Amino acid sequence: MDIELLGTLAVREQGRSITPTAPKPRQVLALLALHADQVVPVPALIEELWAGTPPRSARTTLQTYVLQLRAFISAALEPGDGRQGRAGRCTAKDVLVTLPGGYLLDTGNGTSDVREFDRLVASGTQAMDASDFPRAARLLREALSLWTGPAFADVHGGVQLDTEARRLEETRLCALDQRIEADLRIGRHRELLAELTVLADRYRTHENLHGQFMLALHRSGRRGEALDVYQRLHQTLVRELGLEPSAALRRLQRSILMAGPDTPAKTARTHAEQLVRAG
């Protein structure tokens, strides 16, 4: 089974889609796929579907959704080409398993983009901690490439899916932050300028990204533009949040101010690295 959750929902069994179009069964499948190969308790599924106000028929309705999902799975399984189930040849009940207290989606050692993303981010972070910046940049770039849109983009999520979507987005943003830092450490400042221009506009109060943008501009010989980035961030923080930029970002601005236009940006780079570590 191949599971994609970092964008539109796509679940394929032996290359054939088992993703329903109806909203509620999609929601059930998304939660089962998120926790693939683990038991998802019935109360958790009911909470996801009905947000604390389930109908009296909640369990029966959930069973109906499970039956609908098994129908999709059965259609994807051709005689003779399935996995081997507990009682011989694989059936839909061997893929979407009923267990005491809940249901389990058995991937049969398949793939999940969420699991792969978390694995790559963890490996990339370890590489950063070991100062292996080329490897960190490669791993984190590979992790970020798994995203094709917002997590669960076409699923009407309840409390659990919405919470997980926020966690994944925060992890994605942290991975992006680290990947840019790794690229700066290996001298890819000019290659980052176009990307950072977009990111600074999208995340208008994100100090780390703005600090990285300032550093990339400064190291590219564009000191005035680096200072403009600081001024725009300062104005946005004061206007929208009533806050001043952090001390680390102010130090970065001063180091750029004191540096001549042709001076190597060693001091600025040091302050930017301190900013990233502080963030």
Image (cartoon, helix red, strand yellow):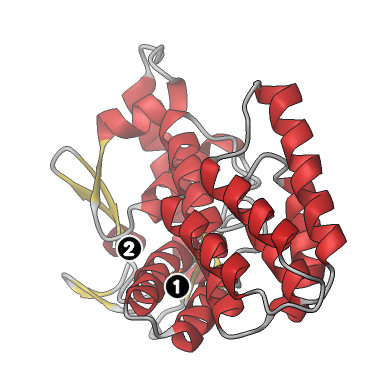
Where is residue 91 drawn, in percent x and y? 33, 66
- Picture residue at 43% right of the left edge, 20% below the top: 51
Residue 160, above or below 255: above
Going by the numbered disc 1, the residue's amino acid type is: Leu
- Picture residue at 61% right of the left edge, 66% below the top: 268
Q: Quadrant of residue 109?
A: bottom left
Q: Quadrant of residue 106?
A: bottom left
Badge 2 element: helix
| Front residue of 68 and 33 | 33
Where is residue 10 drawn, in percent x and y? 57, 61
Residue 15 in sight: no
Where is residue 24 drawn, in percent x and y? 53, 35
- Picture residue at 47% right of the left edge, 83% below the top: 133
Rounded to the nearest angstrom, the CA distance separating label 2 from label 1 is 10 Å
Could you classify mark 1 by the number of other residues whose Cα lies within 10 Å: few (under 14), some (14-19), or many (20 or more)? Answer: some
Residue, disc 1: 77
The tag earlier along the polypeptide, 2 or 1, is 1
Residue, disc 2: 95
Q: In the image, 78: left or right of 262? A: left
Residue 137, above or below 228: below
| Front residue of 104 and 34 | 34
Badge 1 element: loop
Q: Are marks 2 and 1 in contact (CB under 8 Å)?
A: yes
Residue 196 in sight: yes
